Image (cartoon, rainbow, N blue to C red):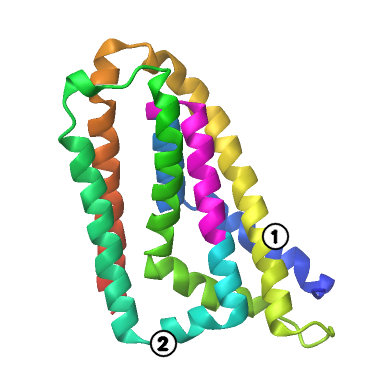
Amino acid sequence: MIDLSVLPVYLTAVLALLLIPGPDMLLVASSSLSYGKKVGIFASLGSATSGLILTLLAAMGVSALIAISPIALQVLRLLGGAYLLKMGWDCIRTQPSDAPTVKQNSSLAKTLYKRAIIGNLLNPKTLIFFVLFLPQFVSTQVTATSGEQMLVLGLVLNVLGLLFNLLLVAMVGSLGRPLLKNEKFRTNQHKFMGLVFFILAIWMLASQVTAV
């Protein structure tokens, strides 16, 4: 369904992208370190889910229409930044007495899953990435339509991204296991995640400002 001659170049580009630290890597690594492997896995699945949604939008051309609208991008930028700031504030204001136990950390998995999805979908930079990156590897030498090729390319990207994030979870989660048993760390783990969300919000908004 895709031109196999471009596959080596595409895989090389995807590998390079995965190795560059970005918001996804930061969220997955920090949630694994703060709350354990299970939460990190769900954050990884949330990132993969949003990637699949954006792949479908790109394949259908919907995201291309949104990307060319300055107003739509501005709205996404503000919503995305505001959402991340709210998540950060909610974590920062959590009282030490509310610090979760290791068992209670399991209930955070679904929350981080949803946050990873919404955070990515509200990030216009991610949207533009799918619109601009995938078409570079669409070939006219195969019978498949550009939409079908973009769908396959996006699936490959998301599968490799998920595998990479799961590997990251395995490594960082092992390092974080002793921390989860540390009472002092557990009382501050929400504040650590709050700082991460603030950094993500600033990262998102600043990158869009410099791109204007």
Query: Callout 2: few (<14), some (14-19), or many (20+) C-alpha neighbours within 10 Å?
Result: few
What residue lies at 35% left-to-right and 17% top-to-bottom? 101
Is residue 12 something that shows in the picture? no
What residue lies at 53% left-to-right and 33% top-to-bottom? 169
7 vs 56, nearest the viewer? 56
Would you name the residue on which mark 1 appears? 156
Q: Is residue 53 left or right of residue 106?
A: right
Q: Position of residue 177 (x, y in %)?
A: 46, 17
* Above-or-below relation of 106 to 152: above
The magenta stretch is: 34-51
Q: Is residue 205 left or right of residue 28?
A: left
Which quadrant of the figure contains the C terminus? bottom left
Query: Callout 1: few (<14), some (14-19), or many (20+) C-alpha neighbours within 10 Å?
Result: some
**SS at badge 2:** loop
- Quarter holding residue 88: top left
Q: Is residue 39 magenta?
A: yes
Q: Position of residue 10 (x, y in %)?
A: 69, 66
- The disc placed on residue 68 is 2
